[in-house]
Image (spheres, rainbow, N blue to C red):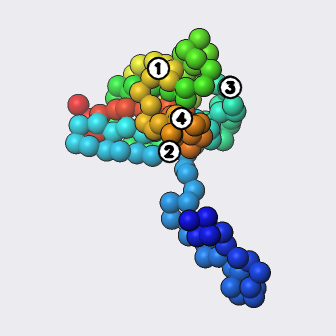
């Protein structure tokens, strides 16, 4: 099995070039799931915030503002922050709320017509396992560090 995981680059230069597969290889700042009733935009916290921090970069604020084009006028928007399981609730609950509030502040600056509800959930409601087979799962923890925006898909 290990032999299959090793790429021999000792061959000719032509053989050593691996194909680049762009699709699905880069995680964007957000992922959107839309139903008839509601739209949920999941923002990747790792691209918005430094580790353990809740300050948005100017580029992050601009990216959030761009995501609001599809939000109906005067819509109610829930802004929910989540963390991974490292650090415990005493750290994760305030951090998740601060991150959600930072995103809400960027939304309010770009779209003052929206009615915002902000809540931090800490490590509750993970979307991926924080551990796999009893070991740390960095990929799963990264997916759990997020801020979700939920709003009606169409005007009420």
- Mark earlier in primary sequence (1, 2): 2
Is residue 32 found left or right of 92 in the rendered image?
left
How crowded pointer 4 is (Cα within 10 Å; few <14, some 14-19, many 20+) is rated as: few
Q: Looking at the picture, how far across and down is residue 72, in whole percent?
A: 34, 36
Cβ atoms at labels 4 and 1 below 8 Å apart: no
Which residue corresponds to mark 3?
53
Cβ atoms at labels 3 and 1 below 8 Å apart: no
Question: Gap in Å between the C-alphas at discs 3 and 4?
Answer: 27 Å
Which residue corresponds to mark 2?
30
Q: Is residue 152 above or below residue 13?
A: above
- Mark earlier in primary sequence (4, 1): 1
Q: Secondary structure at mark 2?
A: strand
Question: Gap in Å between the C-alphas at discs 1 and 2?
Answer: 19 Å
- Residue at image location 37% in from the left, 32% down from the top: 150
Q: Secondary structure at mark 1?
A: loop
Is residue 156 found left or right of 139 in the rendered image?
left
Q: Secondary structure at mark 4?
A: loop
Q: Looking at the picture, how far across and down is residue 95, in whole percent?
A: 60, 19
Nearer the observer: mark 1 or 2; the answer is 1
Q: Nearer the viewer, residue 19 or 112?
A: 19
Question: Gap in Å between the C-alphas at discs 3 and 1?
Answer: 16 Å
How crowded pointer 1 is (Cα within 10 Å; few <14, some 14-19, many 20+) is rated as: many
Which residue corresponds to mark 4?
134
Which residue corresponds to mark 1?
121
- Mark earlier in primary sequence (3, 1): 3
- Residue at image location 71% in from the left, 80% down from the top: 16
Q: Looking at the picture, how far across and down is residue 94, in whole percent?
A: 58, 14
């Amino acid at each position: 099995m290990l032999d299959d995981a090793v790429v021999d680059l000792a061959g000719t230069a032509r053989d050593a070039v691996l194909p680049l597969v762009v699709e699905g290889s880069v995680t964007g700042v957000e992922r959107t799931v839309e139903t008839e009733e509601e739209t949920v935009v999941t923002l990747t916290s790792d691209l918005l915030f430094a580790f353990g921090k809740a300050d948005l970069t100017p580029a992050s604020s601009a990216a959030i503002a761009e995501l609001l084009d599809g939000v109906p006028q005067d819509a109610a928007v829930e802004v929910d922050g989540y963390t991974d399981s490292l650090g415990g609730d005493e750290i994760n609950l305030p951090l998740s709320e601060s991150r959600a509030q930072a995103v809400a502040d960027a939304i309010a600056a770009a779209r003052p017509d929206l009615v915002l509800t902000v809540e931090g959930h800490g490590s509750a409601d993970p979307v991926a396992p924080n551990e796999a087979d009893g070991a740390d799962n960095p990929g799963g923890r990264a997916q759990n560090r997020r801020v979700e925006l939920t709003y009606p898909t169409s005007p009420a």
